[in-house]
Image: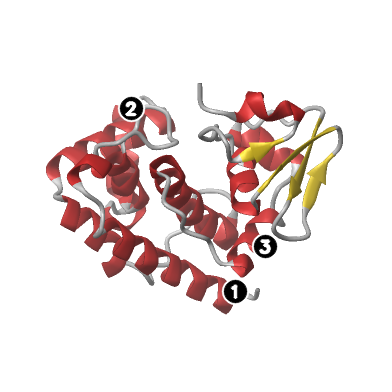
Amino acid sequence: MDLVSIRRAIAAERRELADLLDTLTAEQWDAPSLCAGWRVREVAAHMSMGFRYPLPAVLWELAKARGGLHRMTDRLARKDAATASTGELAAFLRDHADHPWKPPVGGIEAALGHDVIHGLDITAALGIDRRVPEERLRVLLGTVSPKSLKFFGADLDGVRLRADDLDWSYGTGAELAGAAQDLLLVAYGRRLPPGRLHGEPRARFVVA
């Protein structure tokens, strides 16, 4: 995918996720996500943080967090999830579908990854069978590398990932198989609900 196509994919992903969020029940909004310590509503709030906070505000919040990026994002996600309605949290994504925000590192592919992975943090945890379009997955699968695994804290030592729904594999060792989007979650340091992964090393990557 070229730059224009990736931007279109990002906009489509945000609109699709906003539509999905609008269908969730109150219980689902308060259910745990795959992001440790965050409910669905904190993940949704975090996804639009880059659209809603101008750079000076981000720098101020980062200073208050003593330079701790994770502390800052956690505090803002919890604050925004507590003050915004569920309708507002969905609208933040829809209304900013074409926003050019990108994470501090990783470029435009990282922006797509941010939306796809956090969307899966919600749907996989809730057991919603949303299939991310293959062309978006292939962009992100192509970015998996030793550097990205280290950044996201994914320990794949001695493990070979193999998608069973498209032609993709990564690494060497004992085979861990599953849907490409589930393996992408593994590569982003997530642990998944039971039954989604197959192979001898699967217990390492399942939610306790």
Residue 60 on image: x %, y %: 29, 38
Q: Secondary structure at mark 3?
A: helix
- The image's colour scheme reads secondary structure
Q: Earlier in the sequence, mark 1 or mark 3?
A: 1
Q: Amino acid at mark 3?
A: Arg
Q: Secondary structure at mark 1?
A: helix
Q: Is residue 15 above or below residue 64?
A: below
Query: In front of the other: label 1 or label 3?
Result: 3
Residue under circle 2? 65
Q: Residue at x 65, y 53 (%)?
A: 180
For residue 132, side relative to residue 199 (left or right): left
Q: Earlier in the sequence, mark 2 or mark 3?
A: 2
Measure how far apart labels 1 and 3 are at the Cα level: 14 Å
Query: In front of the other: label 1 or label 2?
Result: 1
Q: Nearer the viewer, residue 28 or 60?
A: 28
Q: Earlier in the sequence, mark 1 or mark 2?
A: 1
- Per the rendering, the mark at residue 3 is 1
Residue under circle 3? 138
Q: Is residue 126 above or below residue 1?
A: above
Quarter of the image with the N terminus in it: bottom right
